[in-house]
Amino acid sequence: MLEEKYAKALYELAKDKTENEKKKLFLNFVGLLQKNGHHSLMGKILKSYEKISIEKNISDSVELVVADLKFKEQYKKEIKNNKEYIDAKAEMNVVEDGSIIGGFILRSKSVVIDGSYRKALLDLYNNFIK
């Protein structure tokens, strides 16, 4: 569809630009749409642009926090098998944080999954004292 082609082109042009450069690009883009008689597609183009942006940002990088690095491979395999959480092509950075006691925390630009023992223990404590 035409709006998807416009959105992809706009995304590719804007991805490495500063905010000022993006503003100028957007104004020029709106002018191009008016010149070509496609101004009415602007809403659909912006929706497609947003969808592309979300898809691209999800796959950029993922941080996996584990209590002990000896368990990193176990959690990496478990998480990569669940494609609903991260893109299989995403680069996974592993960080050790003993304060989570056990389990893992998975962070991406759009998702945070806290499967740490610390959170589970705090939830149990909070439910117990209520």
Image (spheres, rainbow, N blue to C red):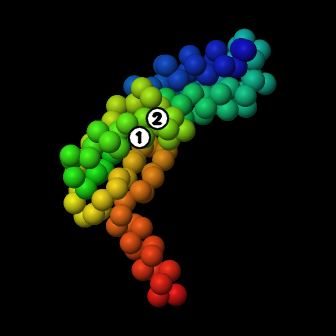
> Can the viewer see residue 21?
no
Foreground of the two, 23 or 121: 121
Q: Determine whether label 2 and label 1 are within 8 Å by CB.
A: yes
Q: Position of residue 24 (x, y in %)?
A: 51, 27
SS of the residue under disc 2: loop
Label 2 to label 1, Cα distance in Å?
A: 5 Å
Q: Position of residue 52 (x, y in %)?
A: 57, 28
Name above or below for residue 130 compared with residue 56: below
Q: Amino acid at mark 2?
A: Asn
Residue 38, picture quadrant: top right
Q: Residue at x 26, y 47 (%)?
A: 71
Q: Is residue 102 left or right of residue 110?
A: left
Residue extending furthest toward the bottom? 129
Q: Amino acid at mark 1?
A: Glu
Q: Which residue is mark 2?
A: 81
Foreground of the two, 64 or 16: 64
Q: Which residue is mark 1?
A: 78
Q: Is residue 59 left or right of residue 53?
A: left
